[in-house]
Image (cartoon, grey):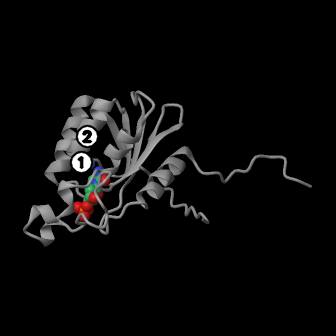
Amino acid sequence: MSETKKRRDYISWDEYFMGVADLSGRRSKDPNTQVGACIVSQDNKIMSMGYNGFPKGCSDDEFPWGKEAETTDPYSAKYLYVTHSELNAILNYRGGSLEGSKLYVTLFPCNECAKAIIQAGIQTIIYKEDKYPDSPSVRASKRMLNAAGVRYYQYECSGRKIEIDV
Ligand SMILES: Nc1ccn([C@H]2C[C@H](O)[C@@H](COP(=O)(O)O)O2)c(=O)n1
Ligand SMILES: [Zn+2]
């Protein structure tokens, strides 16, 4: 006989959206840090996604993926060229306004992304990791987010392993 009750072990909204952000980050070619972002409407519809990478036309094979610390030449490190996952998610959105939306992101937003997040009207940030909390970039980001009234909190890892076959 077939089951008539709904299944109980379905994933939560937070697991779903952070899972999508995480999956998006797996498209990143950055050898050191892969970041994924997923923007969600107030009624839990996915509006946009992004990951860190070089802009269109800037080849992943020609532009550098190294860190500045490993070289003294800033032009041969990734930082001047890479677009962050949050900014890509904002720019990938083609539907109009992101006012009141939520951002799921696997790494705490930097100051540049915070500016874009605030100006886009994103209201809430749910982040997974805060890898560089003492960096000027993250400190400035928090200062701006606090001033602008953008709410942020850390994703509570459920510990559930979500496997997908592709
Ligand atoms: N919120 C953030 C912070 C950083 N990124 C990107 C920028 C780089 O590709 C990478 C960080 O590299 P690392 O210094 O850890 O080697 O992550 C981002 O997309 N969003
Ligand atoms: Zn950023």
Q: Check the picture and name the quadrant holding the N terminus.
A: bottom right
**Closer to us: 150 or 121:** 121
| Label at residue 114 | 2
SS class, disc 2: helix
Q: Position of residue 9 (x, y in %)?
A: 66, 54
Q: Residue at x 45, y 52 (%)?
A: 21
Q: Residue at x 21, y 61 (%)?
A: 78
Residue 131 in view: no
Check disc 1 and report the residue beneath it: 110
Left or right: residue 11 compared with residue 18: right
Instruction: Categorize mark 2 by other alpha carbons within 10 Å: few (<14), some (14-19), many (20+).
Output: many
Name of the residue lying farthest toward the bottom: 70
SS class, disc 1: loop
Q: Check the picture and name the quadrant holding the C terminus.
A: bottom right
Residue 92: image quadrant is top left
Q: Residue at x 38, y 44 (%)?
A: 89
| Distance CA(mark 2)–CA(mark 1) | 6 Å
Callout 2–callout 1 Cβ contact below 8 Å = yes
Amino acid type, mark 2: Ala
| Label at residue 60 | none
Q: Position of residue 103 (x, y in %)?
A: 40, 41
Disc 1 C-beta below 8 A from ligand 2: yes
Amino acid type, mark 1: Cys
Q: Residue at x 59, y 63 (%)?
A: 164
Indicate whether 151 appears above or below 106. Answer: above
Q: Position of residue 13 (x, y in %)?
A: 55, 44
Left or right: residue 30 compared with residue 161: left
Q: Position of residue 14 (x, y in %)?
A: 50, 46
Left or right: residue 36 compared with residue 12: left
Residue 50 in view: yes
Name of the residue lying farthest toward the front: 57
Disc 2 C-beta below 8 A from ligand 2: yes
